[in-house]
Image (spheres, grey):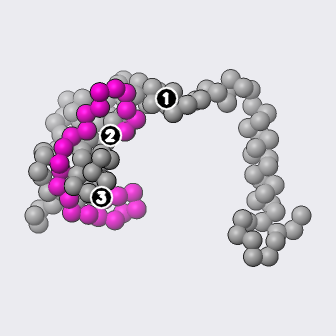
């Protein structure tokens, strides 16, 4: 099978590789495939890991670095930086993957409902 001209999906070798990966997955024991069968199971697993390791403030004994109203510079996963203010703290009532992964702060942003981690913030001394 030859790659089609102008087709953006890749070469026929990419297709063959994809088929081999699919066959590999299908050949695994059912229990292994179902080990992480749902988002809920994932949340329970990372929450349990978080509860044991306590890698983030404040549950590790260190205070949070920022308070409500603090001016901060938020750096997103692409390296873009934005001047923002802390508007609140994320305090879920049940198991939360976001909290287990270090998300603690709400910001005045276009997504004010999405918490961000302390490691993505630094003080904005120019404010």
User: At 51% from the left edge and 27% from the top edge, which residue is drawn?
Assistant: 41
- C-alpha separation, residue under disc 1 versus residue under disc 3: 27 Å
Label 1 element class: helix
For marks 2 and 3 on the same chain, the one whose residue lies earlier in the sequence: 2
Of tags 1 and 2, the one toward the viewer is 1
* Residue denoted by label 1: 40
User: At 81% from the left edge and 55% from the top edge, which residue is drawn?
Assistant: 16
Classify residue 28 as left or right of residue 113.
Answer: right
- State yes or no: residue 85 in magenta: yes
Question: How crowded is the residue under tag 3: few (<14 C-alpha within 10 Å), some, or many (20+)?
Answer: few
Discs 2, 3 touching: Cβ within 8 Å: no
Of tags 2 and 3, the one toward the viewer is 3
Q: Residue furthest right?
A: 1
- Look at the image and tell me in which quarter the C terminus lies: bottom left
Q: Is residue 32 visible?
A: yes
- Look at the image and tell me in which quarter the N terminus lies: bottom right
Label 3 element class: loop
- C-alpha separation, residue under disc 1 versus residue under disc 2: 18 Å
Discs 1, 3 touching: Cβ within 8 Å: no
**Residue 21, x across and y down, in percent:** 75, 45
**Residue 48, x across and y down, in percent:** 41, 24
- State yes or no: residue 76 in magenta: yes
**Residue 33, x across and y down, in percent:** 67, 30
The magenta stretch is 75-98
User: At 21% from the left edge and 33% from the top edge, which residue is drawn?
Assistant: 58
For marks 1 and 2 on the same chain, the one whose residue lies earlier in the sequence: 1
Q: Label for residue 102? A: 2
Classify residue 27 as left or right of residue 99.
Answer: right
Label 2 element class: loop
Q: Is residue 123 visible?
A: no
Q: Label for residue 110? A: 3
For marks 1 and 3 on the same chain, the one whose residue lies earlier in the sequence: 1
């Amino acid at each position: 099978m030859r790659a089609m001209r102008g087709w953006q999906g890749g070469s026929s070798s990419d297709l063959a590789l994809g088929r081999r990966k699919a066959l590999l997955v299908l050949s695994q024991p059912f229990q292994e495939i179902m080990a992480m069968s749902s988002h809920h199971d994932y949340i329970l697993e990372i929450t349990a890991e978080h509860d044991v390791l306590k890698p983030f403030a404040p549950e590790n004994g260190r205070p949070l670095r920022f308070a409500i109203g603090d001016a901060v510079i938020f750096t997103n996963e692409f390296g873009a930086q934005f001047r923002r203010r802390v508007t609140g703290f994320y305090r879920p009532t049940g198991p939360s993957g976001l909290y287990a992964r270090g998300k603690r702060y709400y910001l005045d942003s276009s997504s004010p409902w999405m918490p961000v981690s302390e490691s993505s913030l630094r003080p904005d001394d120019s404010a």
